[in-house]
Image: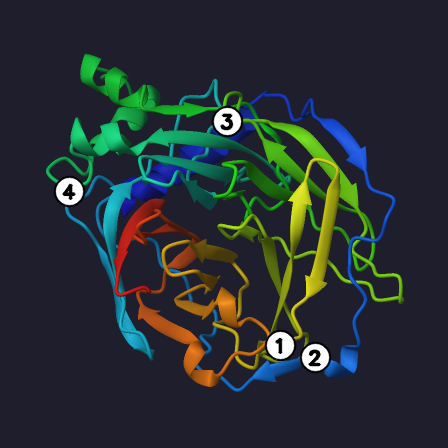
Amino acid sequence: MKLFRGITTALIALVSLSAVSTSAQASTYTQKSHALSPYTASKWKTVANANNYVTKPSYVANPYNYFQTSATQLTYARGNQRASFKTNIFLPAVLHSNSPADWGNPQSIALTSGGGTAYVMYAAASNAKTGWVAKYNLSKLRNTYKVSSSRMDLLRHAFYVLMQGGDTSEYKAVRKCVTYGSRFTTGHGQSLAMNPKNGQLWFVQNPGTSGGTATVQRLSKTTLRPYQTVKFKPRSSDGHKVTMGSNLTFDKAGHAYFSSFVAGSKKLKIYKGTISSKHVKFALVMQGLKYRPGTVNQSISYNSHSNRLYFISDESISSVPVSKLGKLKPSDVKATAFNGHREFEGLAFTSSGTPYLLLNRSAEIMKGSGIQ
């Protein structure tokens, strides 16, 4: 822990020295039509799912040595789905001063269908709504460098030496498995998502205000920067105005989803729609959850293998079948609360249904079991 505190101090200093561009060269389309379908508010209902709500925990950093060589675990606490997570890869948290610097603050993750590549969006520690995206060659890191088994500390060592010295040819080779783009305006960064129908990467750059202009952007897999921007207003022709959530996912048919909380309650709303380079349209699903998973609306995810949507909060995950949206029964809602007091950031699935959870404090990717 002493080493980790030293790293954190170094990160703060490095952020102040970072001089990277925050502008994104992206073509912009401003949508004139309404981006929200009309609905009757009084007809919105909730499914009476079990209350597995988790209050925001007092976060603790990974309690082991920063260069630990064995996995940590998140275990089942309660809920109707017994599930657990175990460290798969410890992500780096520092880089040299000529780069964005603080890699300790990942916010969202997207996986290729086979799980061999991960895209991770990072937020700057300065909380300036800027960040960057890193692309990890997970297959090579696991198979060649054994970072998920016998050499779990290798990836962190390979990046840490850039600040402290002691570089080696192996460390240099390991770092080639990670590429990253320059800094740009990311917003909160919670929403990076891959559309499994076309492989496109999108994120919510600005959720806007109720009925005000919101912004989504498409990310280039080559430059790891946004290159298409769509601005729109999530309001309907019958006068409804909403704020787009800072979360996003897509199902295998290409439909987009985001979720939002109902103020003063534990209820959750779900919106379903489409996103393309020149059109955004969402509709409120007329049935939500009576009990959302927890205090913080960290992210939303989709599993093409089970065709389910997942709502991620700290220490808690709930899910529902896409085929039953609008007509859910309490038994359709799966929920798991976990032990660990960790900050959950994002959840992504391979095409075979294997779940991978992104965590903060300190950054790592965990592989799950029991999540359906």
Q: Nearer the viewer, residue 36 or 369?
A: 36
Assign a secondary structure to mark 2: loop
Question: Residue tagged by mark 1?
Answer: 287
Q: Nearer the viewer, residue 171 or 261?
A: 261
x and y, in percent, of residue 354 in the image: 29, 52
Disc marking residue 69: 4
Q: Amino acid at mark 4?
A: Thr
Reading the chain from its start, which is encountered first: label 3 or label 1? 3
- Label 3: how many Cα within 10 Å (few below 14, some 14–19, many 20+): some
Assign a secondary structure to mark 3: loop
Question: Which residue extends farthest left?
Answer: 150
Q: Is residue 94 above or below residue 366?
A: above
Q: Amino acid at mark 1?
A: Gln
> Residue visible at 68% across and 25% down?
23
Question: Residue tagged by mark 3?
Answer: 221
Q: Nearer the viewer, residue 323 or 207?
A: 323
Q: How is the image coloured?
A: rainbow
Reading the chain from its start, which is encountered first: label 2 or label 4? 2
